[in-house]
Amino acid sequence: MSDVAVLLIPSMLAAGAVLIVLGVVGRDRPTRERRRSARLRDWMAQSGAGGASVGQLLATCIGIGLLAGLPLLAMTGSVWLAIAFAALTGYLPVLALRARHRRRARELREVWPEAIDHLVSAVRAGLSLPEAVAALAERGPQALHEPFVRFAATYHATGRFGDSLDILKAELADPTADRVVEALRVAREVGGTELGRILRTLSGFLRDEHRVRKELEARQSWVLVAARMSFATPWLVLLLLASKPETVAAYRGPTGALVLAVGAIMATAGYRLMLVIGRLPREKRVLR
């Protein structure tokens, strides 16, 4: 009986520990997945592709990779070269979305102070804050035209300013937009003589922040250009050398595959390292 107890007690303790760990991991996993999914949706929305799904983006990447890899395979007969360039080409849609994301974020940072100035002018003219915000659909900056058109339609259909702001914030999915929307919500509650002062303070703060960030981005640009050139140059040289039969023959075997894999890892690691060194801190959506 004592032998059974000696075996049973450690087994029960181990089983209990495993169940506790599984319970904690199982509880945290959905949270992590939701956060990852939310970040991905925000990134797609900020890139101007909020209407597309992750599956559509993946299908586009695969299709473009096949369009580049199959002709190269037919011309060279090297599977490894075709796979390498198909992977590189298939990543181009993601790079294009990243470029759009940076450009759109920069445009929004530039136009928000102007939009707030329009709000201040409309409030001074006697419009209520919801009507002043809806008027940005016609008088506001072009970069914010479509989101505020939908805001105006939602507000005029429902009459609910808070819910319309929530829809606007979800569509823009931008940290600066989050701050502006929450400031408008607070300004709606405060009202009175404080409304104009709140909006003017917010406009000045956004202008100062954009000016500082623009100077930092100008100094950072040479790091980004150098990183892209250092990554792309070896692959362009390899593509030019692929026109020679002896080069293609060298990359048909397992040794060529190993060289391509090591080269891809080193090029990617160097590229990511340079981006990390020159990266500016990104503002997170804390007012989601």
Image: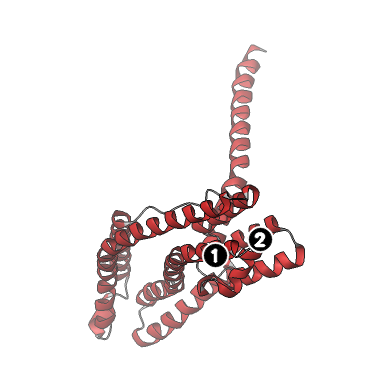
Identify the residue shown where x is 43% and y is 54%: 205
Residue 115 percent location from the top left of the image: 51, 65
Above or below residue 251? Residue 70 is below
Residue 128 shows which numbered tag?
2
Query: Which residue carries the number 1 mark?
Result: 121
Q: Residues under labels 2 and 1: Cα distance?
A: 11 Å
Mark found first going from the N terminus, 2 or 1: 1
Identify the residue shown where x is 44% and y is 68%: 107
Residue 6 percent location from the top left of the image: 60, 16
Question: Is 44 on the left-hand or right-hand side of 247?
Answer: right
Residue 80 percent location from the top left of the image: 36, 73
Residue 281 percent location from the top left of the image: 38, 52
Above or below residue 268? Residue 183 is above
Q: Residues within 10 Å of mark 2 (few under 14, many from 20)?
A: some
Question: The residue under label 1 is which amino acid type?
Answer: Ser
The figure's colour scheme reads secondary structure
Quadrant of the frame with the N terminus:
top right
Q: Residues within 10 Å of mark 1 (few under 14, many from 20)?
A: some
